[in-house]
């Protein structure tokens, strides 16, 4: 039986702390595979260790593959076929995006941390399946420890004596973690309605002189759908306890069966809503949210139209005013809100929503009977929380952080990270800013009890001796019963665990690596402004939204051009110079970038008009439907972007300038004659 005392704990001799900047030289294979020998030694070491493990299991067993078998023609043929297929695969893989290179500044991917790669390979040989302790063994414990590490990184409590204790686990990525968030928050928000209906159906008379009895006797469906997580779980527990006192184990078993049958997970949305006075519940998210949110709504049967968009401001962050208006209008229509989503690192711009404003708004509204969950989609920005943490887990003061950067963290960014501890749950992707191989996402809940709510085996144990229950416990050894996925790679857990152990999740550990990415972005930001000034007599270059972290976008409009379509043609031609093409060798590319767009539907008029005006486009050019404004997007993850003389980023800015100037002269033939000299 799994006991928490045996939970995975850091290697006693491992230094808890600092990773110096110079130590990062040992962290990656490197752009020219400089650490090939190191990686080879570690991989071969891992393989040998595994070989010894097999041989020492039952060393005297007979060998089934005899030494002589290796010389048989059949054996040789199969080896040859294997080699042939692997060589072909290796050739195909040469068309992959060169994520390892500092010349790659496109999508959210970079080189991989060596401990993560080797741990993945090492664990792969054992093929642990983290669906359960039986199948995943120590790697399931490693996974749950990773969940706790990530929880502490964002400020959730994990100590056994904490009144509310966090729980987290790995997923295949941010998408599944986001789906899981809505799945869990819907379960808890709608639970009190099921409890009330079960109490009614079974004629259980909870005395009205008790708080829950009074509440149940008077609660409308709207009130039931607006309880806090703690109150919802407490209501169920109190009703169970009362029933147990009155009718013993038979009565409580009957109640439990009834509650489970009335829950939305059993009824389905249509039947569940048909029996209530509330309208279909919604999820509130900024227009900048990732498309996985729309997927989540559709997948869970909540309906894409019930994902309610909130306007973003001119920093591409959720507007608190728009959020307030949205929540007020939902309250007026008695529409329950399952959750408000804040994004910590938008996919396109890396901008951060004001999590502090979202949790403050929730606290205010709870007093007026409107409650909702708060989930943070920090698939991208989650690991940046390390920059804000001291080794002892406390939050670093903003001043001490500010002294290391030019702009980071702005006050809104600092406040957003400081408020993370007050949210309900969070998505963090180790396979993004964790520099860990796919697949590795994570879902972390502040209150582990919400995880038990969705167990496939009812987590309900009645103790006859003292008439108590185990209702809210997650049985960690049966992970697969509590999450969306079933069989899942324990090798992912090994990978994330090894990285977190080598690079502890605080500013002096993992933060050393992420600091480089922020410094690179600040450098690029400043140099783009210099470039903008240098080419101002021929083109207008803007950074549409000030970067909050390490994603920087830009747009260029040839001077005198007022039309969006012409500008987009120019931008596409510019992107063509850094786009991977299936028909051309990768080596022909100097740099590899990515693109995004600002579309009219996702921006309120004031913001899009301001962007259009800064670019010199005619007013109304961003109002029409179409593909919006085409932008170059740079994700700055590679640790060597500012290394060397000239640095890769210096070379990139030079390259960008050359391409812009060439296109102004030779580019799309409908540019105004003032642009770049005809
Ligand atoms: C903010 C955000 N959320 C969710 C996701 C989805 O993550 P995944 O691709 O790992 O499923 C992404 C992916 O880029 C993202 O940027």
Image: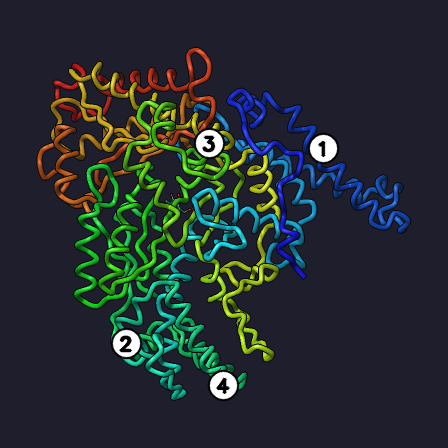
Q: Residue at x 68, y 31 (%)?
A: 42
Tag shown at residue 673: none
Which residue lies under the disc numbered 2? 219
Which residue lies under the disc numbered 3? 507
Q: Earlier in the sequence, mark 2 or mark 1?
A: 1
The correct choice, above or below, for 666 with respect to 303 in the image is above
- Label 1: how many residues lie within 10 Å, few (<14), some (14-19) or many (20+)? some
Mark-to-mark CA distance, 2 and 1:
65 Å
Q: Residue at x 19, y 30 (%)?
A: 567
The correct choice, above or below, for 656 with respect to 261 in the image is above
Which residue lies under the disc numbered 4? 251
Give the SS element for disc 3. Answer: loop
Quarter location, residue 90:
top right
Which residue lies under the disc numbered 1? 44
Give the SS element for disc 1. Answer: helix
Expressed as whole percent of the image width and height from the top left, the position of residue 205 reads: 37, 86
Mark-to-mark CA distance, 2 and 3:
48 Å
């Amino acid at each position: 039986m799994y006991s928490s005392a045996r939970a995975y704990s850091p290697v006693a001799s491992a230094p808890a702390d600092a990773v110096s900047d110079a130590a990062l030289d040992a962290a990656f294979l490197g752009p020219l595979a400089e650490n090939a020998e190191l990686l080879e030694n570690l991989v071969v070491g891992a393989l040998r260790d595994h070989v010894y493990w097999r041989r020492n299991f039952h060393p005297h067993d007979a060998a089934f593959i005899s030494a002589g078998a290796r010389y048989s023609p059949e054996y040789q043929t199969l080896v040859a076929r294997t080699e042939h297929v692997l060589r072909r695969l290796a050739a195909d893989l040469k068309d992959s995006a060169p994520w390892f290179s500092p010349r790659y500044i496109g999508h959210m991917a970079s080189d991989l941390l060596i401990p993560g790669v080797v741990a993945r390979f090492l664990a792969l040989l054992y093929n642990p399946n983290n669906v359960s302790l039986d199948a995943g063994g120590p790697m399931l414990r490693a996974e749950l420890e990773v969940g706790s590490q990530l929880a502490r990184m964002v400020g959730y409590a994990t100590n056994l004596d904490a009144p509310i204790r966090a729980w987290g686990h790995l997923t295949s990525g941010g998408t599944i973690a986001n789906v899981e968030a809505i799945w869990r928050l819907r379960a808890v928000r709608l639970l009190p309605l099921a409890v009330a209906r079960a109490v009614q159906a079974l004629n259980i008379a909870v005395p009205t002189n008790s708080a829950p009895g009074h509440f149940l006797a008077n609660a409308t469906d709207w009130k039931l759908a607006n309880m806090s997580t703690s109150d919802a779980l407490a209501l169920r527990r109190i009703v169970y306890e009362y029933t147990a006192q009155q009718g013993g184990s038979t009565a409580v078993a009957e109640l439990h069966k009834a509650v489970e049958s009335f829950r939305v997970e059993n009824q389905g949305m249509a039947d569940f809503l048909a029996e209530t006075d509330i309208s279909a519940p919604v999820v509130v998210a900024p227009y900048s949210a990732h498309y996985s949110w729309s997927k989540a709504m559709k997948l869970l049967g909540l309906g894409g139209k019930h994902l309610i968009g909130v306007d973003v401001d001119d920093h591409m962050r959720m507007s608190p005013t728009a959020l307030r208006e949205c929540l007020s209008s939902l309250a007026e229509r008695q529409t329950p809100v399952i959750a408000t989503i804040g994004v910590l690192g938008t996919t396109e711009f890396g901008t951060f929503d004001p999590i502090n404003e979202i949790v403050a708004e929730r606290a205010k509204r709870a007093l007026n009977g409107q409650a909702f969950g708060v989930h943070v989609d920090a698939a991208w920005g989650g690991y940046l929380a390390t920059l804000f943490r001291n080794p002892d887990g406390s939050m670093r003061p903003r001043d001490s952080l500010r002294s290391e950067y030019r702009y980071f963290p702005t006050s809104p960014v600092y406040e957003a990270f400081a408020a993370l501890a007050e949210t309900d749950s969070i998505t963090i992707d180790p396979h993004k800013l964790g520099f860990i191989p796919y697949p590795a996402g994570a879902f972390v809940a502040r209150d582990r009890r919400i995880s038990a709510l969705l167990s496939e085996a009812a987590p309900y144990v009645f103790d006859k001796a003292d008439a108590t229950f185990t209702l809210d416990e997650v049985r960690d050894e049966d992970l697969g019963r509590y999450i969306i996925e079933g069989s899942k790679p324990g090798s992912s857990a090994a990978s994330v665990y090894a990285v977190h152990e080598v690079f502890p999740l605080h500013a002096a550990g993992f933060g050393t690596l992420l600091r480089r990415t922020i410094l690179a972005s600040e450098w690029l930001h400043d140099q783009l402004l210099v470039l903008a000034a240098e080419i101002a007599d021929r083109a207008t270059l803007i950074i549409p939204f000030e970067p909050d972290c390490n994603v920087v976008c830009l747009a260029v409009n040839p001077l005198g051009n007022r039309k969006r379509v012409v500008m987009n043609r120019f931008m596409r031609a510019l992107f063509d110079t850094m786009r991977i093409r299936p028909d051309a060798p990768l080596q022909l590319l100097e740099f590899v970038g990515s693109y995004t767009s600002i579309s009219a539907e996702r921006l309120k008029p004031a913001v899009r008009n301001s962007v259009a005006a800064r670019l010199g486009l005619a007013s109304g050019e961003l109002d029409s439907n179409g593909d919006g404004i085409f932008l170059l997007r740079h994700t700055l993850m590679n640790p060597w972007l500012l290394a060397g003389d000239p640095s890769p980023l210096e070379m990139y800015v030079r390259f960008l300038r050359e391409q812009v100037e060439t296109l102004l002269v030779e580019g799309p033939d409908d540019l105004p004659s003032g642009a770049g000299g005809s």
